[in-house]
Image (tube, rainbow, N blue to C red):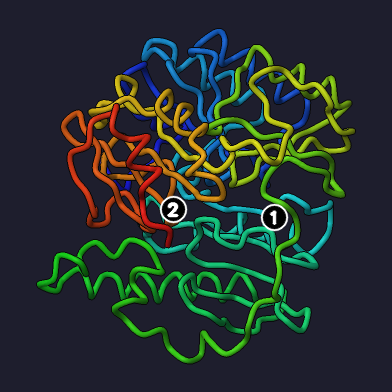
Amino acid sequence: MKGWCPGAWVPMASGDGLVVRVRPRLARLSRAQVEGLCDVALRYGSGVIDITSRANLQLRGVAEADHEALLQELARLGLLDVDPGLEGRRNVLVAPDWRTGDRTARLAEALLARLADLPELPAKFGFAVDAGAALWLEGASADIRLETGADGGLVLRADGAASGRAVREDEAVDRVVELAEWFAVAAGRASGGASPTLRRMTRMARLLEAVPLPEAWTGVAPCAGRAAPRGPGMTRIGPVVGFAFGQARAGRLPEILKAAGAQAVRVTPWRCLVLEGGRAVAHAPDHAITDPGDPLLGIDACPGAPLCPSASVETRALARRLAREPGLAGRSLHVSGCAKGCARARPADLVLVGREGRFDLVANGHAWDEPCQRGSGPDELDALVRQAPVP
C-alpha cells in the first residue's frame, strides 16, 4: 500500500518473505553491529541488505516463523527500539558527517528524545538534521528540516519552502513539534475537502502546493552548497562506497570494512555507506562500487517482480542493461515495478513504470506522474531511452 513503510516490529510481506527495516540510530553502526546484522541476514533472511533512500537498512526474505528470533537478535545488537510505536516514528535523517557532541548530533539526539511529543503523522513523514558547516541532505526525503542558515545560524524549514525560520538551538525541537502540529492540522483540514488531491496530502511539500505556509515559518535561507559528493569518494569521515540499487550482500559486507580498516559505517540517503575512519578501498568486493563514474549510480530500481507483489515487471536486470546505453550518459533513470515509485521519491530525468507487464515512460518526473508514452515492451526500451527528450 502506498504511504506505508515496513519497520522491525511491523515488517512488510513481499514476494520473497518479510521485509524488516532497521533504523540505525544517527545512521551509524559500529563494526560489531555490521557484522552481527550481516550474520542475522544470512541466518534468517536471503542474505541481502537493502540500503534505503532514508538511510535505513532492510533485511529481505525473512520467514514469519523467524521474525521473533530476528527481533531478539536486533535487540541484542542495539538496533531495535523497545517501544514499537516510537520505532515507527523514528524517521530522522542525520547528516553523516556528524561528530560526537557537535550541533548536528546534539539536535538529532534531542529530537529523538521528543518523538512521543509529535502529533499523529503519516507513516512516511520524516525529519532531517543537517546542521554542519555545509548541507549534506539537500534533496533527501524529509518534511521538516533543521539546517545551517546562510549566516551560520540554525534554520527550521518546511520542505517545499525556499526559506525557513531562524531558531535557537535550545528551542529548536519545540519549534519542530510546533511545525509538525501545524502540518497535522492543515493536512487534516485538507483531507476533509472534496478534492482527491487534497486527501492525499501526506507530505509537507505536496501540502504547501495547496495550502500557504504561515509567514512566521519563512524568511531565512539555508546555506548554499552541498558538503560532499553523493557517490564514491573520500570525505573527512572516511571513504564512500556505493552499491547498485542500494543492495549489499551480507556475506561480503564485512570484507569491505576489513579492507578499509573502518570501525563503523554511516548510512547515507543516497544508498551509499561511509566507512568511518577507513582508508580508500582500491579493490572492493565485486558488488561494491568505488568508481564515482559508474553509470549504475545514476539508476534507481525497486526489487520488481517477482519479489514485490505490486510489480508486474522485472526491473533490476533491465536497469543493468540500460546502464550501458550511451543515451543515458549524465541522465538519471528510475525503473519502477509499479506507479508507487518506492525506489525514488525525487524526480528523475527518465522513469520507466511497469504496468500490466509493459512499461510507461515519464520524462522528468515521478513514477506516479502522467506518462508521455505508454505500453512499451522490454525489448523496445533501449531505443526508447536513446530517443527520449532531454529535459
Residue displayed at 53% across by 48% down: 90
Q: Residues within 10 Å of mark 2 (few under 14, many from 20)?
A: many
**Quarter residue 181 falls in:** bottom left
SS at mark 1?
A: loop
Q: Which mark is residue 95?
A: 1
User: Which marked residue is nearer to the observer: mark 2 or mark 1?
Assistant: 2
Which quadrant holds the N terminus? top left
Write down the residue under mark 2: 348
Disc 2 + disc 1, Cβ < 8 Å: no
Vertical order, 114 against 280 (above or below): below
User: Would you say 330 lies left or right of 256 here?
Assistant: left
Query: Considering depth in this image, is 324 or 244 the residue closer to the camera?
Result: 324
SS at mark 2?
A: strand
Residue displayed at 77% across by 84% down: 151
Vertical order, 156 against 82 (above or below): below
User: Would you say 361 lies left or right of 385 here?
Assistant: left
Query: Considering depth in this image, is 346 or 116 the residue closer to the camera?
Result: 346
Vertical order, 193 against 217 (above or below): above
For badge 1, the amino acid type reads Ala
Q: What percent of the width, then of the height, locates residue 147?
A: 66, 70
For badge 2, the amino acid type reads Ala
